[in-house]
Image (cartoon, rainbow, N blue to C red):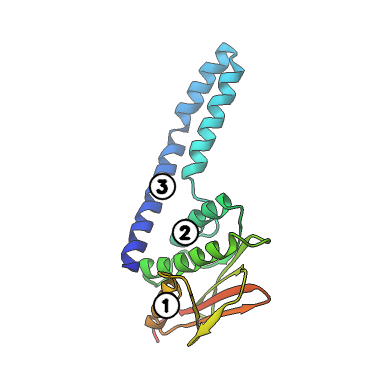
Amino acid sequence: MQLTHAAIDLNHMRTMQTQAASYRHDMRHHFTYLQALAGTGNLDKIQEYIQTAQSDLDAITPKRFCSNELINLLLSAYDTKAESEGISLLVQASIPAELPLSDTKLCAILSNALENALHASIDTEEKFIQVQLAERNQTLLIQISNPFIGTVAFQNGLPVSTQAGHGFGTKNIAAITDSYHGQFQFFAKDEIFTVRVLLPLVET
């Protein structure tokens, strides 16, 4: 179910990317209309049209965080979610454009980690999510940190949720990481929760 949901999210984000490319392609039509408005001297109408066009474009244009299409789309989607909650998404990403990993599995790892970080950060005083993505020695590093309120209990290396229906995200991260013979670590220190995943980019 997690992988199916991840595939649906990917298709949705790629559709948005296509829409943004189409919108940019049609910019010449917008300029033609603006020139016509300029000829009438209607500055108020010009400003209104520009603001509407800018809002439409911002709503469907993914931000550029890295050259990897999948990860860039995911980060752009969660940046929008975080911004709506007043949370800053701080990203350091230095990864190849192509990765020898399943798109849906990679999407599931990142989506679960980012979703958990988003929920944990909403009620904190410092609202931020720090994302580090890097390729080192043929290994992909994924590290996501966020502030949290309260305490975190662990069982068998995994955080334990007391809320019904929660806690599956970290289990899915662990299961997918294990399927790649990678390593995962969850830890909480000084009111900062961190998930760290290492995925080998070569067969082991």
Q: Position of residue 69 (x, y in %)?
A: 45, 58
Residue type at mark 2? Leu
Residue 79, image x, y percentages: 54, 55
Q: Is residue 28 above or below residue 123?
A: above
Q: Kindly indicate the quadrant of the structure image that contains residue 4.
A: bottom left
* Residue displayed at 56% across by 25% down: 48
Q: Quadrant of the N terminus?
A: bottom left
Q: Secondary structure at mark 1?
A: helix
Question: Of the residues shown, which amino acid type is indicated by label 3?
Answer: Met
* Mark 1 lies on residue: 171
User: Relative to 161, is 101 on the left or the right?
Assistant: left
The amino acid type of the residue labelled 1 equals Lys
The residue pinned by badge 2 equals: 74
Q: Quadrant of residue 134?
A: bottom right
Would you say the residues marked 3 and 2 are in contact, meaning their CB atoms lie under 8 Å apart? no
Mark 1 / mark 2, whichever is N-terminal: 2
